[in-house]
Structure formats: C-alpha cells, structure tokens
Amino acid sequence: MPQTVTHNIHEADIIWLLAGWCWNQIHPDILQKKKVLVTEHHIVPEKFDSERLRNFLIRDQFADAYHVPNEKTASFIRPLTKKPIYVVEYWYDPRLWFSEDKEKCRELLGISNDKFVIGSFQRDTEGGTCLPKLEKGPDLFVEYVKKMRKDNLYVLLGGWRREYITTQLDKVGIPYKRIELAPITMVRTMYNCCDLYVVSSRYEGGPQAIYEASVMKIPVISRDVGVASRVLCANCIVDIPHDVYYPTNSDIEMNFKNVQKYNIKYHKETYRKMLEKIIG
C-alpha cells in the first residue's frame, strides 16, 4: 500500500467513517461506489433507542465492514449486521506519552507534594446541563473518591464539561484543580502529577487514558470496560466504587508490559492488514 490516505474522496478505495454518525453527510452515490468502513467506538445500550437502531440499519446498507476497538462493542452490534466486524484496539504514540519528574510537574501546576492526587481527564456532564453523563460514571468516580477517606486527597480534572463532578466535590469539601481543554503537553504533565488514575466509566471504546497511563507507569484502575481487560492486569480491574485498590509496583510493570503491543510503531500494521482485507 504505497499510499494510504487521500484528501480527495473520489480517489479513495475505502471511505473510513471514524465518526460513524457522519455517514449521511456523504452523498449516497459515493457511498455505494466505494468500500465503506464504519468505526463504532462504543454504544450505550440505554441510549440505543428505536431511532438509533433505525439509523444504524439504514447506514448498514452502505457499510462493507465495521471496526470496533473492543469485543464488548462487537458483541452489541453483531446481531444487527451481517457485515464483517474487525476488532482492532486503539493505539498510543510514545513520542507523546512518557514519564516526567513528578515533583517538577506538581510545581508547574501548583500542587503540593504531600497531596494524594487522583486524576480524571474525560468529560462527565451532558452538554448544556449539569446532569451526569452516566456512561462515563462520574457518580461512581465521586463515590470512589469519597470512599478513599484520605485527609490529603486531591482531585485533578482535565477535559471539558466537568460541572457534575466539580459540583459534587464542592458539596463534600474535596479539593480539586480543573484544567479545561489542556494541550497534549499539559495533559502529559497532569498524568505525571497523579498518584492514581481512575476510569469509572460504565461504557467505553478505549479509553485512551488506559493506554496513556499504563505506558507512563501511572497507577491506573478501571471498571471492566472497553480495552481495560486487554491492557490492565487483573488486579487493576476494580469494581468501582465498591472496592478500593491501589496498584502495586508489580501491577504497574505488568500494565506497562501489556500496553507495548499497542505502540503505534507496531500496531499500525494491524490496521493496515484490516484495510487490505476490506479492499480484497
């Protein structure tokens, strides 16, 4: 495959809909003439109503194959289509995600070294409201943080739409810092400030945080969502908020070892093989 990407849709052999919802922004004649690959990152069953099912089935007429990042998503859509489904996990770029000195990172962000910092860098609030985005588990995150009962507890929040969690933390008096829409270099600094990163989601495609925290050797725990069981050791798959667990050095090293296969340098070959199969 000497050329893999073109900006001219008419030159493409495959139209890859990385955001599957945007399929109806492309003329049906083009979709019918090309191979169409649809990525379904994750599906929230509670939100998959009759309208979403109808849209899925209409789009399915144009799709030639589906890409999903985890087996859980594959299991959901498998009864809905006869098209092939490729389970290929996400990747990470080691040029972006690497360890830095924790004390220097905390100094940069104004966080005291005596704090126990828990990180969460994804949105938690439904757009235009203060209601929790339940698939991301912000309610579970807050309950987990409260259960830890550490006097020196400090929460570091990234991403946007964090109103639900900040409101709840204010109610119980847990201090936090919120850095909204930080650039990648700042997000790396934020990871390196953390004593623990918590993925409390109910549904996920990845999330990318599992790859990023693991390769940076940041202690990370997660509910059994997305790719968690493919990357994290069994100890780090936690029933949040009911069980409190802090990864050991052995856990951290195992996570680091497991995540290596998703280095973009090597993992891109898995994607290339998928595309070759679709072209046929």
Image (cartoon, rainbow, N blue to C red):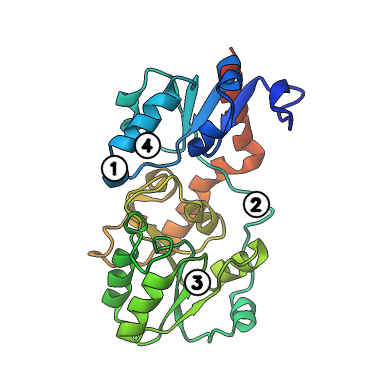
Tell me residue 170's x, y (percent). Answer: 36, 83
Callout 4 amino acid: Thr
Tell me if label 1 and label 2 are in contact, CB under 8 Å.
no
Callout 3 amino acid: Cys
User: Whole-Å distance between the Cαs marked 3 and 1?
Assistant: 32 Å
Q: Earlier in the sequence, mark 2 or mark 3?
A: 2
Say left or right for 146 vs 254.
left
- Foreground mark, 4 or 1, reads 1
Q: Earlier in the sequence, mark 4 or mark 2?
A: 4
Tell me if label 4 and label 1 are in contact, CB under 8 Å.
no
Task: Tell me where residue 151 sits by quadrant.
Answer: bottom left
- Foreground mark, 3 or 4, reads 4
- Residue 273 visible to the viewer: no
Q: Which mark is residue 45?
A: 1
Q: Residue at x 58, y 80 (%)?
A: 106
Crowdedness near tag 2: few (<14), some (14–19) or many (≥20) residues, C-alpha within 10 Å: some
Q: Which mark is residue 94?
A: 2
- Residue placed most toward the observer, 98 or 59: 59
Q: Earlier in the sequence, mark 1 or mark 2?
A: 1
The secondary element bearing badge 4 is classed as helix
According to the picture, the residue beneath numbered tag 4 turns out to be 73
- Foreground mark, 3 or 1, reads 1
Tell me residue 111's x, y (percent). Answer: 54, 84
